[in-house]
């Protein structure tokens, strides 16, 4: 899977103000420079917000003058545009424009729900929606069932070097910015997927193996119960 970010775009409350765009060159290292407090950190926050974050981390000085934030990117060569309305009264907006292709001239909401859009993006990112959980083993090697819902957003933590961890020794993943990954078991499983140690087929195989072991355990309990009755 190849993800390429092409453009970030901002529409403003003042209709006489022209939209602002930041374009990225594909297959290049794009370096953004500027003085302090000029919005460099906000760039990743805009990307995260347009990728349907449940939190809003864009600087107030920008969000109060912006009406919409847009992200144009491609997955495996297929271009996608997501434009999300800026929050009002600090409430995260559910108004989103989504399209395969470029940005609209004037954004307007065209989706039914964020959850449906997340499912659509999961397909584009290559996630099989039938696999939504996996099973882990605790430290005593006893089978312990834990279910985790995961999607494309869970892997953004490996793509972001945020200002929270820049210059901080021995901290490599920003689980403050991505607070949904606070569970270490979930993060471990996602790390295995991101590094290629496991893939979705392996996870599904583990799921099926766990179910079989669970059935065998139930059968063994039934067997022991019957034997106990017969002995009595």
Image: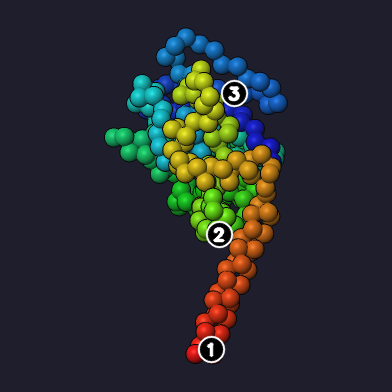
For the residues labelled 1 and 3, say whether their Cβ atoms are less than 8 Å apart.
no
Position of 86 relative to 152 (above/below): above
Q: Disc 2 designates what residue?
A: 143
Q: Position of residue 166 (x, y in %)?
A: 51, 20
Q: Position of residue 125 (x, y in %)?
A: 62, 45
Q: Is residue 96 visible?
A: no
Tell me which numbered mark, 1 or 3, is placed earlier along the sequence.
Answer: 3
Q: Disc 3 designates what residue?
A: 23
Q: Position of residue 100 (x, y in %)?
A: 60, 43
User: Nearer the observer, disc 1 or disc 2?
Assistant: 1
Instruction: Provide the secondary structure element on which disc 2 rests.
Output: strand
Q: Which of the pair 82/216 is nearer the observer?
A: 216
Q: CA distance from mark 2 to mark 3?
A: 49 Å
Q: Is residue 113 left or right of residue 65?
A: right
Q: Residue at x 61, y 29 (%)?
A: 6
Tell me which numbered mark, 2 or 3, is placed earlier along the sequence.
Answer: 3
Position of 82 relative to 145 (above/below): above
Q: Residue at x 63, y 43 (%)?
A: 192
User: Nearer the observer, disc 1 or disc 3?
Assistant: 1
Outermost residue, front side: 231
Q: Disc 1 designates what residue?
A: 231
């Amino acid at each position: 899977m190849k993800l390429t970010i092409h453009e970030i775009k901002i529409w403003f409350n003042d209709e006489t103000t022209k939209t602002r765009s930041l374009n990225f060159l594909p297959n290049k290292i794009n370096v953004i420079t500027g003085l302090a407090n000029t919005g460099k950190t906000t760039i990743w926050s805009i990307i995260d917000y347009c990728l349907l974050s449940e939190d809003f981390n864009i600087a107030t000085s920008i969000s109060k003058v912006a009406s919409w934030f847009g992200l144009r990117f491609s997955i495996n060569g297929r271009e996608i545009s997501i434009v999300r309305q800026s929050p009002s009264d600090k409430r995260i907006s559910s108004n989103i424009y989504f399209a395969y292709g470029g940005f609209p001239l004037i954004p307007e909401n065209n989706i039914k729900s964020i959850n449906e859009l997340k499912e659509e993006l999961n397909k584009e990112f290559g996630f099989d929606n039938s696999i939504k959980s996996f099973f882990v083993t605790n430290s005593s090697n006893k089978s312990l069932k834990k279910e985790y819902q995961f999607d494309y957003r869970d892997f953004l933590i490996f793509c972001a070097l945020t200002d929270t961890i820049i210059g901080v020794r021995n901290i490599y993943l920003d689980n403050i910015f991505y607070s949904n990954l606070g569970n270490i078991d979930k993060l471990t499983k996602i790390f295995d997927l991101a590094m290629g140690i496991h893939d979705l087929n392996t996870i599904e195989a583990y799921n099926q193996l766990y179910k079989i072991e669970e059935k065998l355990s139930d059968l063994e309990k039934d067997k022991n119960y019957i034997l106990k009755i017969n002995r009595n």
